[in-house]
Amino acid sequence: MSTGAPERLAAALAAAGVVWSEVDAYEELDGGTFNTVFRVRSSGRRDGIVVKLAPGAGVPVLRYEEGILGTEAWFYDVVRDGAPEVPTPVALAPATAGHLVMSECAGRPWSELGEGMSDDERRLLRSELGRHVAGLHSLKGDDGFGYPALSLGPLRATWREAFLGMVDAVLLDAERFGVALPRPVDEVRELFAGQGGSLDEVTVPRLVHFDLWDGNILVEKGRVSALIDAERAFWGDPLAEFVSLALFDDIERDEDFLAGYRAAGGSRSIRRTCI
């Protein structure tokens, strides 16, 4: 493998102490919508390596997406320090704006398991997942609410300020990229601002993964083996987590997940519905 090395992949591996001459094989993985992802096998390591490469220079991204590979590495470090029972990859080198090198975790994405899982197996997995998510939400931020990459500015003292800033950034990006929204931008902004009282009920920043759909949950031998793809994590309201955990459904219907979550000390914020 001494010739034809993808330049950015080789540079990322070098940052983790892996020289290209030790690379036995690499392959690009499917499923990514933001980064380009490679699985690497190296003669210098027993375990596999996963490398994420961010979009190249000049590729437009959303404001909150700036520096999110650094967020993912930070998330894994925070979880390993504060909630080591929650399985995640290990960042093998400090992430840069351009790449992240981490350990490969055993298992397959839950979304690929299809109908091969019995009802009892699924119930046990949902309960275990609930316990892991409660572990994430047990971690508190000391410096405020918001994105740790500071892509939208410094962390905020209140969840209201942080969340409305997140909403405003997305709305500004919609205008920047010419995205047609179902309602006018100002109307959407006012709708969220009108719920400021609910946002003020959240007073403690909690670690939120914010992308825990089944594709980002690895399963091995009937157990949750890793929570991955944490680029969009932030300090905020744990209620936000339940959106991706119950895509196109209602988390209140997931009794097994909620039982595991509550048993591990998780608690939910007050939910309100706005029309």
Image: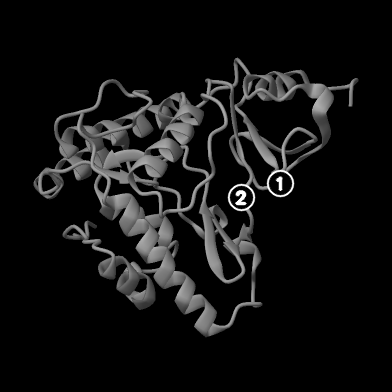
The kind of residue on which mark 2 rests is: Cys
Q: Nearer the viewer, mark 1 or mark 2?
A: 2
User: Closest to the observer: 171 or 93?
Assistant: 93
Q: Which residue is mark 1?
A: 30
Q: Is residue 204 left or right of residue 50?
A: left
SS type, badge 1:
loop
Q: Which residue is mark 2?
A: 105
Describe the colour scheme in one phrase: one colour
Q: Is residue 180 left or right of residue 252?
A: right
The kind of residue on which mark 1 rests is: Asp
User: Closest to the observer: 43 or 120?
Assistant: 43
Q: What residue is rendered at 47% in x and 27% in y? A: 70
**Residue 154 appearing in the image:** yes
Q: Is residue 8 above or below residue 37?
A: above
Q: What residue is rendered at 61% in x and 15% in y? A: 57
The residues tagged by marks 1 and 2 sit, at their Cα atoms, a distance apart of 16 Å
The quadrant of the picture occupied by the N terminus is top right
Q: Is residue 55 left or right of residue 207?
A: right
User: Closest to the observer: 56 or 268?
Assistant: 268
Q: For residue 269, which quarter of the picture? A: bottom left
